[in-house]
Amino acid sequence: MYDKKSLIADEFINHQEILDTLKYAEENKNNMELIRQILDKAKPKKKGKETVCAGLTHREALVLLECEIPEVLEEIKQLAEEIKLAYYGNRIVIFAPLYLSNYCVNGCVYCPYHAKNRHIPRKKLTQEEVKNEVIALQDMGHKRLAIEAGEDPVNNPIEYILDCIKTIYSIKHKNGAIRRVNVNIAATTVEEYKMLADAGIGTYILFQETYHKESYLKLHPTGPKHDYNYHTEAMDRAMEGGIDDVGLGVLFGLEMYKYELAGLLMHAEHLEAVHGVGPHTISVPRVKKADDINPEDFDNGISDEIFEKICAIIRIAVPYTGMIISTRESQEVREKVLRLGVSQISGGSRTSVGGYGEEIRPTDTEQFDVSDQRTLDEVVKWLMEMGMIPSFCTACYRAGRTGDRFMSICNSGQILNYCLPNALMTLKEYLEDYASEETKQVGEKLIKQEMEKIPKKAVRETAKNYLEKIEQGTRDFRF
């Protein structure tokens, strides 16, 4: 039976509940009275000086997903943008993936790192190579990384991951420093999650790939990842191990998108019900071409229009979460979904093992084709020209505002009191240390405009003082 408080995967992601939800959504897709109630529930509301959003259940969200009434679709997009601005403002957090190793013992049929792929070169970074990659990323201007590695107990044991994290945090090159390391590695034990927590990681990210158990088992025919329940229950073990920021995601295109969205939202509801903390991030990757992977082999691909609708509904249903879109998507697609709820993007990304240290982008060990191949400087300038603030901020994580502390601040709308000045100060660091002259000119104008939006005079004056000190060479101020 469906039980969102259960710790058993088949109960908190219950197949029959998803089927019943899809049937309910189909039956009510033109029920304007119900749809109006759902939209009204989700709208930001004033509670004293705070703006709060109620979010939606998976059933309510699926009714909106099923609805195809044009005026409702437009209202969904407008509401998603309104909620995004209420929670995150016009800030966009910037990060980069860092691939440590493509050794893998799993047989995932959608990933070129699968064990049966005999022609892809296998590579694992030494600590000296990790150092070189980090320096290259710092010289671009990055402050936040997401490390990636295939599942291989021999080549990529937890000790190797921990050594890499220690190396990454230890590198201080010129004015560069990686201030937050997020980790995207295979499901593991409570004991190993405790090790990751002790190493000072930011968010633990694990994509479910698909919540459809039958499809999951077929897509993961061999290797430890074949165990659906162990994989799906990983976030509970991570939180038991002391990691209070976790990130969910599915790989859209593997299974019917309606089923996936229902499962994804049920997982978020489960984490809130059991741990009092929902997902810190939700990622929305789509299947893309890679070494021996053809997206056309999967018959559940979704159009850009449906993808945009999914992003908007996630923002409405889970208003507090950070939404991530990678360079899998083109500039055009990323530009559209940034308006609809995405709050974090990668920039200047390379998905090869050891890709940043080489002048020419290597492709032989890429996990997927990179659609948006612009430099970080080009991405930063692009965001600012759209009126958005590229943010390299890691202040909440380093100040202990994680897990339920972050969620309580975010849910009340108070996160904006911290984030706007912090975003502007980290942008100022980027402009001083790494930006092209053209990008710097755009950025200085943006900072001047946005500074006037800081509501508290004392905060505004302190931030101005910090910005002056950044110009003089001091770094790493934060509220």
Image: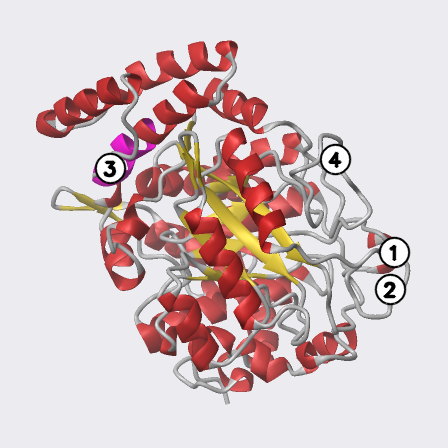
- The crowd level at tag 4 (other Cα within 10 Å; few <14, some 14-19, many 20+) is some
User: Among all residues in the image, which is located at the extreme left?
Assistant: 458
Q: Which residue is mark 1?
A: 292
3D distance between C-alphas at marks 4 and 3: 34 Å
- The local crowd at label 2, few if under 14, some if 14 to 19, many if 20 or more residues have their Cα within 10 Å, is some
Amino acid tagged 4: Arg
Rendered residue at 76%/61% (across/down): 111
- Asked if 61 appears above or below 346 in the picture, the reply is below
Depth check, front residue: 52 or 225 = 225
Q: Earlier in the sequence, mark 1 or mark 4?
A: 1
At label 1, which amino acid type do we have? Asp
Q: Amino acid at mark 2?
A: Asn
- Asked whether, in this view, residue 421 is left or right of residue 5, the answer is left
Q: Which circle marks residue 361 in the picture?
A: 4
**Which stretch appears magenta?**
417-424
- Which residue is identified by label 2? 117
Q: Secondary structure at mark 3?
A: loop
* Residue 118 falls left or right of residue 335: right
